[in-house]
Image (tube, rainbow, N blue to C red):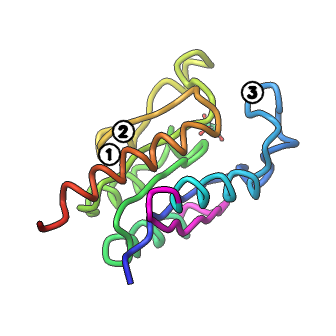
Amino acid sequence: MAKPIYVLNGPNLNLLGSREPEVYGKETLEDLRARCEKKAASLGLKVEFRQSNHEGELVAWIQEARTDAAGLIVNAGALTHTSIAMLDALLACTIPAVEVHLSNIFAREPFRHHSYLSRAVKGVICGLGPQGYEFAIEALASAIQKDRPA
Ligand code: DQA
């Protein structure tokens, strides 16, 4: 059985759809899950889609992804701007990873401009809303393909 792409969502992303819709849009987390599953299926892949409000749980999931995932998408929410623990977990992870943000963090408050995670990932997608997750799945699909022995 091929390994899935882990899609890990951090604090407050469970409130998508009702949380500051002018910033994060109207799609719920379940809508986003369905969107990711559909995109992955169109590329012959599966996603393991999760959300947690707890840093330790997210760290544990990144550690799990080292062995159980083919690739990783992470939207760490506010932990993006604070979590050295998540950075260290990502640095220990050799599978391709993409950081995603629904909003354009660079067009927002200065404290959102720095991400602790970006140095540990292949690429960063931000400001494109839920479609950003689909682009990340596409990018990982090519990266996984490239890493696969012929
Ligand atoms: C976010 C941006 C973060 O700054 C914020 O704390 C979030 C969501 C985004 O997807 O745009 O919770 O990661």
In the displayed structure, would residue 100 be above or below residue 14?
A: above
Q: Position of residue 79 (x, y in %)?
A: 55, 47
Q: CA distance from mark 1 to mark 2?
A: 5 Å
Left or right of 87, for residue 19: right
Which of the numbered marks, if any, corresponds to residue 23?
Answer: 3
Corner quadrant of residue 86? bottom left
- Element marked by disc 2: helix
User: Residue tagged by mark 2?
Assistant: 118
Q: CA distance from mark 1 to mark 3?
A: 24 Å
Q: Quadrant of the N terminus?
A: bottom left
In magenta, the rendered stretch is 42-56
Q: CA distance from mark 3 to mark 2?
A: 21 Å
User: Residue tagged by mark 1?
Assistant: 121
The count of marks equals: 3
Looking at this view, name the residue that lies furthest to the left.
150
- Residue at image point 32% right, 71% down: 66
Name the kind of residue labelled 2 in the image: Ser
How crowded is the residue under tag 1: few (<14 C-alpha within 10 Å), some, or many (20+)?
Answer: many
